[in-house]
Image (cartoon, rainbow, N blue to C red):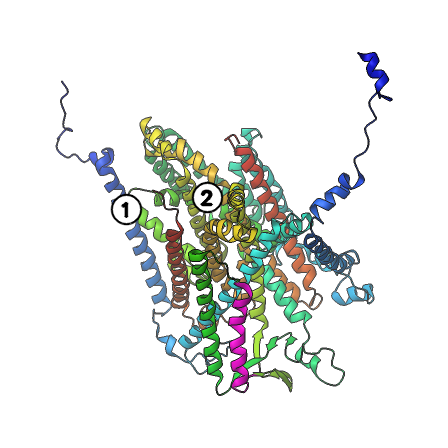
Amino acid sequence: MSDTHAHTVSFVRTETLPEREPPYAASGPVKWMRENLFATPANGLLTLVALYVIYVALSGVLPWIFNGVWNAGSLTECREILDGTRGACFAVLSERWPQLIFGFKYPPEYYWRPTVAFLLLFVAVAPVLFFDLPRKLLAFTAVYPFIAFWLIWGGTVLSPVLAFVGVAGGAMVYQKLVNRSFAAGFFGGIVAAYVIWKIGGFLIPETASDNAMLGAVPSRDLGGFMLNMMLGVTCVTLSVPIGIALALGRQSSMPLIKWICVVFIEFIRGVPLITLLFVASVMLAYFFPPESSVDLFLRVVIMITMFSAAYIAEVIRGGLAALPKGQYEGADSLGLDYAQATRLIILPQALKISIPGIVNIAVGLFKDTTLVSVISMFDILGMIRGPILASTEWNGVYWELLGFAALLFFVVCYGISQYSQWLERRLATDHR
Amino acid sequence: MTTMTDPPQGSFRLSMLLYDTRYRSMTFQAIALLTLIVAIAYLTNNLLVNLAAQGLNISYGFLADPAGYDIDQRLIEYDNQMSHSRAALVGVLNTLLVAFLACMMATIFGVIAGVLRLSKNWLVSKLMAFYVEIFRNIPVLIWIIIIYTIMTAVLPPPNAFRGDNATSSMLMDMFAFTNRGIYLPAPVWGPGSMVVVAVFIASVFGVFAYRRYAKTLLYSTGQLLPTGWPSLVILLVPTILMYFIMGRPVGLDTPALQGFNFRGGIKVGAPLIALWFALSIYTGAFIAENVRAGIQAVSKGQTEAAGALGLRPGRIMNLVVLPQALRVIIPPLISQYLNITKNSSLAIAVGYMDITGTLGGITLNQTGRAIECVLLLMLFYLTISLSISAIMNVYNNSVKLKER
């Protein structure tokens, strides 16, 4: 058969042809561009418009940035160096750097203290953010608030030590009693901490802060981006537990507790943060005992914490509502009481669902810390609009300063939201 | 042989308040109530003691006193001899004005950016992603100040428009962009202009009637009438005809330079524009994300099924995708509107006289009535928020999937 076949066909290729390159227009960048940039005429037009927009933006901004002056004493000096060419005057950033970061009243010889506190912050939050790190690091996280307090405010080391001893004592009492009943552990812990603080308060002499290792800094001297960071970190940390309590209270079957929580949450969510800051600056002082003097920083922390707690409560309520009813019933059928079921079964799952929401609130809150500049606290925006732009040297340097503040916030907020997306993927236990 | 056993009917003991689940919640609530009462009593007592120590009292009488300050941007008649309450009313209207304008524009920005972000065009979708990330991650207060600075530091002062070799000129001789604000021509309503307005309103109703008629015709006979250009004709032609029949009663009062400033026309002040634009682009970025999520929430099978039924792309969008996407988009959209209203209180940072600037700013500082002013301010925002929430609940109930 094969012989006859060989005679009828004049040519048979015995080996395969070498593979040829795909047509130029159907592969590589050209194909990609045809599909993604010039699929239809309208699409092509859109691409050209977008390219033009990008060109205009970059051609305006890039020369301005690269032609920037980093060393000058004032705006006029900057303009002399630039000599009529377009360029930024970044010298204001290098010259006023400490003011932008620490505010204008924080003693310069102490700048290292907030810096150390800031670096330690990363060590402290790392075990909270990344679960793979050794759990023992959490011990440092527990101590960190007291170290940071001592570093930033200075004064006698006894007060943060006493505060820590009180918290530790409360925690120990809680651990002892929590197996009997959660309520006993919780209230026992609070009472123990309170007793330790009261007793300790008598032991610390009035003059302890006078010759302390770290000089005391009053909180009205805090400022700059440090103030934004401090407000953001403190208020988010404090508001998560309060938010959880409010969310649980709102889901409670006890009508009175439910209504207290509903009224609180809806009231806070219904008013803008700025009115709450007005409360902090002009009104809250009336509600404290006459002899006490609660400084503005603490009052602002109280109000911002209340504000973000209400929002976090709503996010967590969403998480609680999203849990299937079977989880609650399963916990009940295991014979767990309310505190055990909530602590061991409900909250871990509900919090996992609410993490993206909580992070959104945290980012929003961090951005909202700029509002304190309205009640004349000198955070980074307050510094820019107040002392720096009002000074004779730097009057008129808007874009460099505002751009710098915007960049700082962008880096932090974008970083946090990227972390939250990573965490969401990491915590996804359902199979897709 | 099962016997029902009654629960033990023992006498009530005190320990049952804590250990018996029937009474425990009562105990807790009683404790909570007591704590609440004690806390309120403590705070009130502190307040009264502090007020007495400073010789103050709580009174709203100051609202009737003359305010004594001027408000540049206002919607109603006001001068500095009028009362504080009138100033607060001007502020309320200004808040509502900027909130309304910003809601409109934020929706436009948000919808455009959200739709373009889903574009198949790689460059455009990346550009929109960039817009969203930049504006969402930088505080709105910084945006307000940046735009205010653009308005006041980059735009020319009014005297740059003056003289023979003026450095700036008005756009089409009608619009002037100055560092004090933008001047627009104002309509002047001459005699007979009401007829034109009435005709215009009637034609708006006419458009709706025509569309309704086209729909009924389509459903009953299957005949499809065009709706696009006839609507436009019905809307515009009668009004324009009537405008010329009545002898052009509506004129324009264009702003003109007089002395050091522009006179005539409508002045939109720099603070209003800064607040309006900043709130719009900032909230627009959030709305863009909502719109994107809403469109992505409609599964692709819906589009394909509609296509299989033979619907054209425009109708697929109108009849299948949008109704389902809107159900997802509208609730967060309304809460963004609420955010705009609350964020409009940042007006105080650029000196726009909204309710925070009048009642919470100058009135508070002049009268020293901090508690009263802040309470009134909170009451106002609370009323707005609760009414918007109420509207949202009504809407949510009306679009809720009817599960049977």
Question: Does B35 sit left or right of B70 as displayed?
Answer: left
Residue A194 is one of the magenta-drawn residues: no
Which type of secondary structure does the marked residue at label 2 adopt?
helix
Question: Does A379 sit left or right of A7 as displayed?
Answer: left
Label disc, if present, on residue A240 of the rendered structure: 2
Question: Type of residue at label 2?
Answer: Val
Question: Type of residue at label 1?
Answer: Pro
Residue at 57% x, 54% y: name it: B285
Residue B245 is one of the magenta-drawn residues: yes
Residue at 38% x, 45% y: name it: A246
Label disc, if present, on residue A255 of the rendered structure: 1
Residue A63 position within the rendered picture, expressed as x and y whole percent measured from the top left: 78, 58
Question: Does B29 sit left or right of A62 as displayed?
Answer: left
Same subunit, tags 2 and 1? yes
Does the image show residue A250? yes
Q: Is residue B109 above or below residue B350?
A: above
Nearer the N terminus, badge 2 or badge 1?
2
Bin the neighbour count of mark 1 within 10 Å (Cα to Cα): few under 14, some 14-19, many 20 and up: some
How far is disc 2 from disc 1 in space, using C-alphas? 23 Å
Subunit that carries the residue with mark 2: A
Residue A252 position within the rendered picture, expressed as x and y whole percent measured from the top left: 32, 42
Say which quadrant the N terminus of chain A sits in: top right
Which type of secondary structure does the marked residue at label 1 adopt?
helix
Write down the region rendered in magenta.
Answer: B227-251
Label disc, if present, on residue A348 of the rendered structure: none
Q: Is residue A341 above or below residue B222?
A: above
Q: Nearer the viewer, mark 2 or mark 1?
A: 1
Foreground of the two, B398 or B300: B300
Q: Is residue B84 above or below residue B246?
A: above
Foreground of the two, B280 or B216: B216
Bin the neighbour count of mark 2 within 10 Å (Cα to Cα): few under 14, some 14-19, many 20 and up: many
Subunit that carries the residue with mark 1: A
